[in-house]
Structure formats: structure tokens, C-alpha cells
Image (spheres, rainbow, N blue to C red):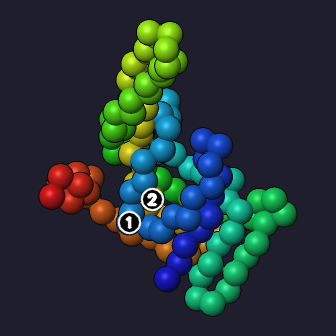
Amino acid sequence: MTYAVIEICGKQLKVEPGRFYDLDRIDVELDGELVIDKVLLIHHDDQIHIGQPYVEGGSVGSTIIGHRRGKKVIVYKMQPKKKTRKKRGHRQELSRLLIKSISLGDNVLAEKEIEIKEAEVAVEA
């Protein structure tokens, strides 16, 4: 099993080829390619490449397969005995990212081609 730990949107994620992840909104069009160079760790066939802070020549190829909004979060503030109440709702803007490949230098360590339509059907089911 090949996986990588990347840094994107101020967060660190463990990613695998062929899987999708929801992140904060990324300004890339739908079906747009995104190459992530901030790779912290790559694990491939019992070999571990650790970066200081990033792995040299490491990259993760991905595609934006959708933009959506997260679950609603209710923020309710109340001050007792003051008749003060505030109720606010928030939905985070998200982008769904499909990981296609993990590369180290010019070598593609793991690659998984998946149709975007199949990924969307899997999400809905």
C-alpha cells in the first residue's frame, strides 16, 4: 500500500491514490488538475521517505471533482438573566479532491485512474 502525507489548506492529510478528500475551497475549476508539491512523507513497499520539511522531488497529482458545502453548524450564544440570545448558522465551502498519483522524482510510485463519474456515483450511494 502506497500513501503520502501532504500539507494543503493549512492541514496535513494522509492520502492514497484513488480516494477522494474534502478540503477547504480551492480556487481551481471543476476537472482541473492540481499538483501538490508539499509532501511530508511517502510510504511505498516498506520504504519510507521523510522530508525535512518536504520530500525532495515528491509530488501528488490530483483532480478537483466537485465544489460543495459542508454540514450546517449552529452557533448559539445566550447570556442568562439578560434576555440576550444569538443564533447563527454556518456552512463551510468545500472542494472534493480526487488523488490520482504519488510520484517521487520522475518515478510514479502509485497511480490509479478512475472515472470521475464513477467517483460521484460512489459518493451518492
Image quadrant holding the C terminus, namely: bottom left
Going by the numbered disc 2, the residue's amino acid type is Ile
Instruction: Pick whichever, 31 or 68, lies toward us.
Output: 68
Q: Secondary structure at mark 1?
A: loop
Q: Report whether 108 appears left or right of 111.
A: right
- The answer to whether 85 is drawn above or below residue 55 in the figure is above
Please provide percent x and percent y for residue 114: 30, 63
Mark 1, other Cα within 10 Å: few <14 / some 14–19 / many ≥20: some
Please provide percent x and percent y for residue 63: 42, 49
Please provide percent x and percent y for residue 87: 39, 19
Say which residue appears at 76% left-offset and 72% top-offset: 50
Say which residue appears at 51% left-offset and 56% top-offset: 61
Which numbered marker is on residue 100? none
Say which residue appears at 49% left-offset and 19% top-offset: 80
Say which quarter of the image contains residue 39. Answer: bottom right
- Which residue ends up furthest to the bottom in the rendered image? 46
Q: Secondary structure at mark 2?
A: strand
Please provide percent x and percent y for residue 56: 77, 63
Say which quarter of the image contains residue 69. Answer: top left
Which numbered marker is on residue 18? 1
Find out whether the residues at labels 2 and 1 contact each other: C-beta distance under 8 Å.
yes
Query: Mark 2 — residue?
Result: 99
